[in-house]
């Protein structure tokens, strides 16, 4: 018997990755064309809680009492902290997870999987967590996974709205004046977010003033970008993206493949382009006018993109 089903979208960071870890603002939007989904069904008595991810051929059994230990599993841990938060024993339940969000590519796959599991499990147990509680639990998962996450991924995914995010501050959403047509291109290289964040930390420790200045410039770009999005100044928004990419190069988080895609997008007529997320691989994004979308998409594929997702971020309501 089906008890619940739940889903969560992917996300893209439009501006401010890495600098956001150091308190600068960042902008992210949900990517609803890709989703993680969980279906929770009643299990036979005595079978416990099983999480099944058939696409990657993984089945895990959730056990008690390991939450504080060194053991970490991306499917088990979200379920454990949910049971702990709800003060529930392990139920007899089978949760089946499927996802269309590419893994390890900066599209928020980890946070979306955790969100879908926590939502599905809490609903199946007859409780619905409010968004703030859910966000807190997913942030806890991100911390186990990432080290020092800013919290932007879980926030945009849990709230499923464009966010202007400053670490430690209340969530701010904002208005979008004109639809934003984005191409999200996968470089085909895995994105080691944790390593990239650690490397930026080492750079920062070696020359704090220098890197603080770069973070502040990125923060200013994010602020200007918010105004450009709110007023529909798309040409300016594109230029801000490209300027943000140059600063990410200065943080050493781009790669030859990402740079090539960014240049290809610009030459094919994109308004702007940059890497998105942790970098070193993963995805880049290009802002395009709808009439250039096909040409820019072909240029991205011709320059090494293994997939290109077109998505339009719409003004609310
Ligand atoms: O690679 P992603 O999509 O998980 O994004 C990481 C974003 C960073 O700013 C690099 C890290 C963070 O925690 O905000």
Image: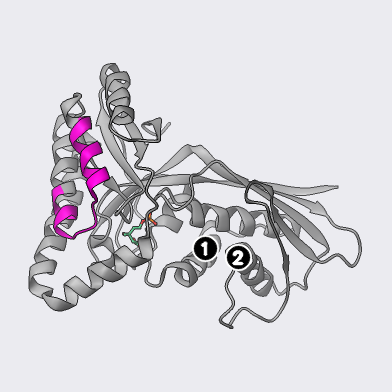
Residue at the extreme top of the image, as rendered: 291
Range of magenta residues? 246-265
Residue, x 30% and y 39% (percent of image)?
285
Counting labels gives: 2
Q: Main secondary structure of the magenta part?
A: helix
Q: Nearer the viewer, residue 137 or 238?
A: 238
- Where's residue 45, x and y in %? 91, 64
Q: x, y (%) of residue 117?
A: 63, 56
Residue 113, picture quadrant: bottom right
Q: Is residue 266 visible?
A: yes
* Magenta stretch holds residue 249: yes
Residue 71: % across, % down: 59, 77
CA separation, marks 2 and 1?
Answer: 7 Å
Q: How crowded is mark 1: few (under 14 residues within 10 Å), some or many (20 or more)?
A: many
- The answer to whether the residues at label 2 and label 1 have Cβ atoms under 8 Å apart is yes
Which quarter of the figure has residue 178?
top left
Q: Which numbered dot is residue 78?
A: 2
Q: Can residue 233 be seen in this view?
A: no
For marks 2 and 1 on the same chain, the one whose residue lies earlier in the sequence? 2
Residue drawn at 32 percent across, 35 percent down: 304
Q: In this view, does 262 lie above or below 198?
A: above
Residue 194 image label: none
Q: Which residue is drawn at 22% across and 74% down?
A: 202
Residue that mark 1 sits on: 138
Within-10-Å neighbours for mark 2: few <14, some 14–19, many 20+: many
Q: Is residue 298 above or below residue 127?
A: above
Question: Is residue 257 left or right of 246 when viewed as pictured?
Answer: right
- Residue at the right extreme, as displayed: 45
Name the quarter showing ligand 1: bottom left
Query: Would you say 220 lies left or right of 176 here?
Result: left
Which residue does the image show at 42% across and 46% down from the upper left?
11
* Quadrant containing the C terminus in the rendered view: top left
């Amino acid at each position: 018997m089906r008890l619940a089903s739940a889903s969560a979208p992917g996300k893209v960071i439009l501006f401010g990755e890495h600098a956001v870890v150091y308190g600068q603002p960042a902008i992210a939007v949900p990517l609803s064309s890709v989703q993680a989904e969980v279906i929770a069904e009643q299990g036979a008595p005595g079978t416990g809680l099983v999480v099944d991810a058939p696409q990657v051929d993984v089945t895990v059994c959730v056990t008690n009492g390991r939450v504080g230990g060194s053991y970490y599993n991306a499917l088990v841990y979200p379920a454990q902290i949910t049971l702990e938060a709800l003060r529930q024993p392990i139920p007899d339940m089978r949760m089946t997870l499927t996802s269309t969000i590419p893994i390890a590519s900066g599209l928020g796959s980890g946070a979306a999987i955790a969100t879908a599991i926590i939502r599905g499990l809490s609903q199946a147990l007859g409780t619905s967590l409010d968004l703030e509680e859910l966000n807190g639990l997913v942030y806890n998962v991100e911390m186990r996974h990432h080290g020092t996450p800013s919290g932007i991924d879980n926030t945009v995914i849990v709230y499923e709205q464009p966010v202007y995010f400053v670490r430690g501050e209340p969530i701010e959403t904002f208005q979008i004046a004109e639809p934003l047509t984005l191409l999200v291109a996968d470089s085909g290289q895995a994105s080691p977010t944790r390593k990239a964040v650690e490397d930026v930390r080492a750079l920062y420790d070696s020359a704090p003033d220098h890197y603080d200045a770069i973070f502040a410039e990125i923060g200013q770009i994010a602020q200007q970008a918010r105004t450009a999005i709110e007023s529909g100044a798309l040409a300016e928004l594109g230029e801000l993206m490209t300027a943000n990419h140059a600063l990410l190069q200065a943080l050493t988080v781009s790669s030859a493949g990402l740079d090539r895609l960014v240049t290809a997008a610009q030459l094919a007529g994109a308004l702007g382009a940059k890497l998105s997320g942790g970098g070193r691989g993963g995805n880049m994004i290009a802002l395009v006018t709808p009439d250039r979308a096909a040409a820019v998409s072909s240029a991205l594929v011709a320059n090494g993109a293994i997939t290109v997702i077109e998505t339009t971020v719409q003004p609310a309501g």
